Amino acid sequence: MALGTLGIILPLLPTVVFYLLAAWCFSKSHPHLADKLYTHKHYGPHLVAWRDRRAISRKGKVSALLGMSGSVPFTYLVVGYPAVIIPVVVLVVAGPWIWLRPE
């Protein structure tokens, strides 16, 4: 949970992945903590949609794809040519997968 919350502030640290992992771990070890996450006002509906239907909201899809797309020029400007291949490959592989998830 702490890493996911830190990801809200830090641009390259993933938020959703750590929240999904925390929800899964809590459901196995501390179900009452998992229930807190699943009933949370902001994160709960998204976590429940993922848990039950592997669904991502349209807003979440657009945000993820825009963030990944923005990382390509950022990486190119900061690190340069060879490293820019990594976010391009991630965008090409993960982008369609994200977009084709149910809503």
Image (cartoon, rainbow, N blue to C red):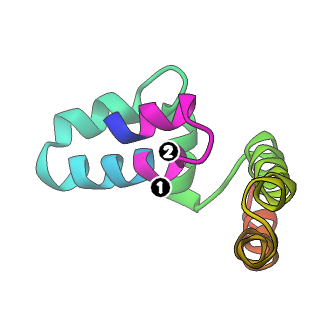
Which residue carries the number 2 mark? 48
Q: Is residue 17 magenta?
A: yes
Question: What's the amino acid at mark 2?
Answer: Val
Q: Is residue 9 magenta?
A: yes
Q: Look at the image and give the residue range highlighted in magenta.
A: 4-18
Q: Report whether residue 102 is seen.
A: yes
Q: Quadrant of the N terminus?
A: top left
Residue located at (62% from left, 39% from top):
11
Majority secondary structure in the magenta region: helix
Point out residue 52 in the picture as x, y percentages from the top left corner. 50, 56
Q: Would you say the residues marked 1 and 2 are in contact, meaning their CB atoms lie under 8 Å apart? A: yes
The picture quadrant where one finds residue 89 is: bottom right
Question: What's the amino acid at mark 1?
Answer: Arg
Point out residue 35 in the picture as x, y percentages from the top left corner. 29, 34
- Of residues 98 and 40, the one nearer the viewer is 98
Crowding at label 1, few (<14), some or many (≥20) Cα neighbours within 10 Å? some
Residue located at (36% from left, 54% from top):
21
Q: Is residue 19 above or below residue 88?
A: above
Point out residue 65 in the picture as x, y percentages from the top left corner. 81, 55
- Of residues 54 and 87, the one nearer the viewer is 87
Residue 51 got which mark?
1
